[in-house]
Image (tube, helix red, strand yellow):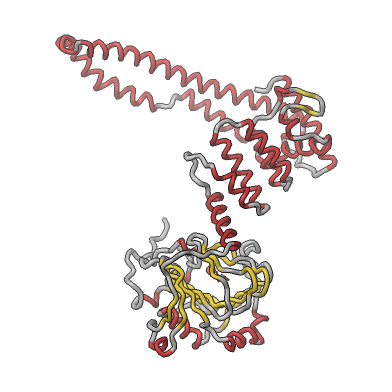
C-alpha cells in the first residue's frame, strides 16, 4: 500500500500531468494518470487487492501449518520405528498402524496437498475480477508521459527523479524502483528519446540485483541500439545471457541481422575444399559447351556459374520496351525489400540454360522474375521456400532450388549473402548462383536463409528462377519422409 508520502507524490504527479498535458498531447478522458480522484480510486483498488492476497496467503498458511504439524507427528512415529523396528513391528497395533498409515494417510495427504482451498480460490477469483479496474497499458503510458513532461518542463534528470528528488523537493522514500526505471526507459525508446532511454536503463541496471532481471534491461537496451544500427554495441548487451534464459525470437533475429551486416561489410574468404571446374555433365549440351562452375557449399549445395548469360541476352532483356514499364513496387514493406520487380515471359533458351546448370526440369517452374535495385536497394533476410501455407506448394511442390542471374554492373555492395553458412556472393554481370532450398528428404533447409545487401554504387538487376519440386521426382534422389503434403493442422 502507498504511504501518505506516496500519496502526496502521486497527487503532485497527477497535477503536473494535467498541467503539462495542457502544453503537449491531450490524453483520453478516462485515464488514471489524468486525475487525482481516479488515483484515489486506485488506492482503494489496491487496498482490496492486498486484502484478497492476504486472505489467500492466510488460507495457505493454515494448510501449511496443518501439514507441518502432521509431518512432525508422523516423523516421531517413524523415527521410533526406525530406532528399533523389530520390537516396534512386534507389536500388532504398531504393525496395524503402519499399514493403515501407508494405505490411507499418505493418500489423503497427497490429495490434500493438491487440493485448492475454496476460501483461497474465492480470494484469487476476487482479485481476478478486479482486473478490469486496474490501470491499462494506456494508463501506464500516460503516467510515463506525465513523468516525461515533468522532466522537460522543470528540466529534471532521470537520476533526480529516480532518487525521489522532485525539483528540490526531496523525498528519498518515493524513489523509483528498478522496474519503474525500466518502464520509463522503454517508454523513452518508443518515443525516440534515445539518450533518456539509456539514462533510465542505466538506473534500472544499478537497481536490479538479479542477473535475469539485469538481462531484461540489457535486452531492451540492445533493441534500442539496433534501431539506430549500432549493432556491435547492441551485441555487447546481449553477450552475457544467463543460462536460464532461452534466446527470444527478437534476439535470434538480431543475431542473424548482425551476421547479415557483418557479411555485407566483410570480404569473406573461407578456406574450403570446394573448387572451380568446368561442368560438362549435367546435360548432353554441356558436353559440347561446358559451363564454368565454382563450388560454394556442399550443404546446402550451392554453386556459381561464370559467364553463363551473354551480354547480348542481357541487353535484349533490359532494353525490352515493356520491361521498365512492367516493373512494379514490390508489395512488401520497404524495410523488407527496397526494389522493383516484374515477372517476365519465360524464354526457352534461358529455361534450357537453367536445366544445363542444374540438371532440373523447368516444367511447372515459376516464370523468371526480374528485380531491379537502386542505390540502397536491398532485400531483407528470407527463405525462398514457401513453407506450408502456399497454394503453389500444394500444386507443384515447394521451391526446391533457386537460380539467380546477375545482369547489372554493381560497383559496390549488393551482394547476396547467406549468413547462416557465411557465404557472400558478389554480383558479377553474366554470372549466376544456384542453390538447393530443400534437403533431399524434401524438408526445408533453414541454412538457405539469405538476403541482398544494400547497393552502394551501381545498379543491380537480378533474374530469378524458382524451380519447383514436383516435376523433379524422377531426376532427384528419393524423397524420404517427404514433406510435400504435411498433415493439415486441426
Ligand atoms: O537480389 C538478390 O541478391 C537476392 C534475390 C533473392 O533472394 C530472390 O529473388 O529470392
Ligand atoms: Fe531469395
At a point 39% along the width and 62% down the height, the residue shown is 486
Residue 267 versus residue 67: which sits nearer the camera? 267
Residue in view at x 44 percent, y 24 percent: 117
Percent across and percent down for residue 350 are 50, 85
Q: Is residue 67 above or below residue 187?
A: above
- Of the 4 image quadrants, the one containing the C terminus is bottom left
In this rendering, position of residue 432 left or right of residue 116: right
How many tags in the picture? 0
Is residue 362 shown to the viewer in this render? no
Quadrant of the image occupied by residue 54? top right
Residue 133 in the image: state x and y as whole percent: 64, 33
Q: Which residue sits at x=57%, y=57%? A: 257
Q: Is residue 276 visible?
A: yes
Q: Is residue 30 above or below residue 315?
A: above
Name the image quarter holding the N terminus.
Answer: top right
Please state the horizontal and vertical placement of residue 161, each as a whole percent of the image. 74, 31
From the viewer's perspective, is 479 left or right of 331?
left
Nearer to me, 323 or 255:
255
The image shows residue 140, relative to residue 485, as above or below, that is above
Image quarter of residue 260: bottom right
Determine the image quadrant of residue 99.
top left
Q: Residue 55's x, y, as percent?
A: 53, 21
At horizontal 32% and vertical 22% (from top left) the residue drawn is 108
410 and 223: which is toward the camera = 410
Amino acid at each position: 500500500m502507498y504511504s501518505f508520502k506516496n500519496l502526496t507524490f502521486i497527487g503532485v504527479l497527477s497535477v503536473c500531468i494535467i498541467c503539462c498535458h495542457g502544453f503537449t498531447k491531450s490524453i483520453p478522458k478516462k485515464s488514471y494518470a489524468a486525475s487525482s480522484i481516479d488515483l484515489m480510486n486506485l488506492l482503494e483498488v489496491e487496498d482490496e487487492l492486498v486484502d484478497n492476497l492476504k486472505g489467500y496467503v492466510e488460507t495457505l498458511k493454515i494448510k501449511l501449518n496443518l501439514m507441518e504439524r502432521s509431518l512432525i507427528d508422523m516423523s516421531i512415529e517413524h523415527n521410533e520405528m526406525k530406532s528399533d523396528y523389530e520390537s516396534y513391528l512386534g507389536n500388532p497395533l504398531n504393525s496395524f498402524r503402519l499399514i493403515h498409515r501407508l494405505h490411507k494417510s499418505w493418500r489423503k495427504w497427497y490429495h490434500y496437498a493438491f487440493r485448492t482451498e475454496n476460501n483461497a480460490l474465492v480470494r484469487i477469483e476476487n482479485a481476478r475480477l478486479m482486473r478490469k479496474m486496474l490501470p491499462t497499458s494506456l494508463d501506464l503510458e500516460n503516467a510515463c508521459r506525465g513523468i516525461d513532461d515533468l522532466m522537460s518542463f522543470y528540466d529534471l534528470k532521470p537520476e533526480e527523479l529516480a532518487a525521489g528528488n522532485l525539483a528540490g523537493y526531496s523525498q528519498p522514500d518515493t524513489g523509483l524502483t528498478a522496474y519503474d526505471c525500466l518502464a520509463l526507459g522503454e517508454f523513452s525508446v518508443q518515443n525516440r528519446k534515445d539518450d533518456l532511454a539509456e539514462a533510465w536503463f542505466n538506473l534500472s541496471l544499478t537497481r536490479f540485483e538479479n542477473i535475469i532481471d539485469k538481462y531484461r534491461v540489457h535486452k531492451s537496451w540492445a533493441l534500442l541500439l539496433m534501431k539506430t544500427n549500432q549493432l556491435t554495441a547492441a551485441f555487447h548487451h546481449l553477450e552475457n545471457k544467463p543460462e536460464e534464459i532461452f534466446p527470444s525470437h527478437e534476439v535470434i533475429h538480431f543475431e542473424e541481422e548482425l551476421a547479415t551486416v557483418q557479411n555485407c561489410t566483410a570480404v569473406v574468404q573461407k578456406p574450403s575444399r570446394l573448387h572451380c571446374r568446368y561442368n560438362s555433365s549435367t546435360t548432353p549440351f554441356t558436353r559440347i559447351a561446358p559451363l564454368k562452375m565454382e563450388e560454394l557449399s556442399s550443404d546446402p549445395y550451392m554453386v556459381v556459374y561464370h559467364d553463363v548469360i551473354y551480354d547480348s541476352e542481357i541487353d535484349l532483356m533490359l532494353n525490352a520496351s515493356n520491361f521498365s514499364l512492367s516493373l512494379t513496387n514490390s508489395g512488401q514493406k520497404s524495410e523488407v525489400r527496397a526494389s522493383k520487380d516484374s515477372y517476365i515471359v519465360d524464354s526457352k533458351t534461358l529455361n534450357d540454360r537453367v536445366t544445363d546448370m542444374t540438371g532440373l526440369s523447368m516444367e511447372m517452374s515459376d516464370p523468371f522474375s526480374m528485380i531491379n535495385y537502386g542505390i540502397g536497394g536491398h532485400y531483407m533476410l528470407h527463405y525462398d521456400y514457401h513453407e506450408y501455407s502456399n497454394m503453389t506448394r500444394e500444386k507443384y511442390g515447394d521451391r526446391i532450388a533457386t537460380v539467380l542471374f546477375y545482369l547489372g554492373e554493381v560497383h559496390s555492395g549488393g551482394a547476396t549473402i547467406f549468413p547462416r553458412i557465411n557465404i557472400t556472393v558478389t554480383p558479377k554481370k553474366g554470372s549466376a548462383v544456384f542453390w538447393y532450398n530443400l534437403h533431399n528428404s524434401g524438408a526445408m533447409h533453414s541454412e538457405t536463409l539469405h538476403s541482398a545487401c544494400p547497393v552502394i554504387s551501381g545498379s543491380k538487376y537480378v533474374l530469378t528462377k524458382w524451380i519447383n519440386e514436383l516435376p523433379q521426382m524422377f531426376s532427384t534422389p528419393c524423397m524420404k519422409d517427404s514433406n510435400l503434403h504435411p498433415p493439415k493442422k486441426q
